[in-house]
Image (cartoon, rainbow, N blue to C red):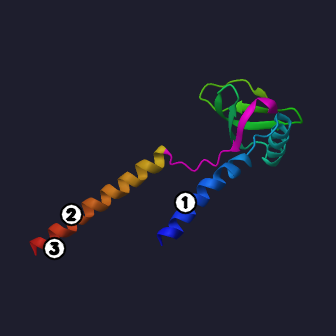
Amino acid sequence: MRFFTAFVVIGALVTSPVLLRAQEPLAPAVETAAFQQLAAGIPIGSRIKVSTNDGRRLTATLMAADAQRIIVKRRSRVPEPAVSIAFADLSELRRDEGGGMSVGKAIGIGLAAGVGAILTLFAIAVTVSD
């Protein structure tokens, strides 16, 4: 068993540089083409999350996408003008599924748990008093 374990560990150590070498960074033109294809697959009007190469991050609504850039409108309380972002400036582009919990949902769950606990205490009190 020790021989087998040692063989597996040595094999992993020997092959890891080979695997790391296989993960080469893409050329900027290839990455830009991938972002263009990704943007073409996202329906207009969808909520997206965008990160740029200079570190800016924003949640926005996709308004248009052409061969060179995307046009998005930032989601904020104060209306802002639409922003054009070139594909070469993107570091991340993904559709925001919005699977988080809203404040109303959290309040509803808390109220339901509280009512359930109070009704349980009343049921126990009625059972004990009989």
Q: Which residue sits at x=72%, y=40%?
A: 93
Report the amino acid beneath label 1.
Answer: Val
As helix, strand or loop, the secondary structure at mark 2 comes to helix
As helix, strand or loop, the secondary structure at mark 1 comes to helix
Q: Which residue sits at x=52%, y=63%?
A: 6
Report the amino acid beneath label 2.
Answer: Leu
Marking on residue 9: 1
Q: Nearer the viewer, residue 27 or 82?
A: 27
Few, some or many C-alpha atoms within 10 Å of disc 1 (few <14, some 14-19, many ≥20)?
Answer: few
Give the distance between the C-alpha atoms of the residues marked 3 and 1, in whole angstroms.
63 Å
Q: Is residue 98 magenta?
A: yes
Marking on residue 121: 2
| Label located before the other in sequence (3 or 1) | 1
Q: Is residue 12 above or below residue 82?
A: below
**3 and 2 marks in contact (CB < 8 Å):** no
As helix, strand or loop, the secondary structure at mark 3 comes to helix
Report the amino acid beneath label 3.
Answer: Thr
Q: Quadrant of residue 94?
A: top right
| Label located before the other in sequence (1 or 2) | 1
Determine the residue located farthest toward the left in the rendered image: 129
Q: Report whether 61 appears left or right of 129.
A: right
Give the distance between the C-alpha atoms of the residues marked 1 and 2, in whole angstroms.
57 Å
Give the distance between the C-alpha atoms of the residues marked 3 and 2, in whole angstroms.
10 Å
In this rendering, the label closer to the viewer, 3 or 1: 1
In this picture, which residue range is highlighted in magenta? 87-102
Marking on residue 127: 3
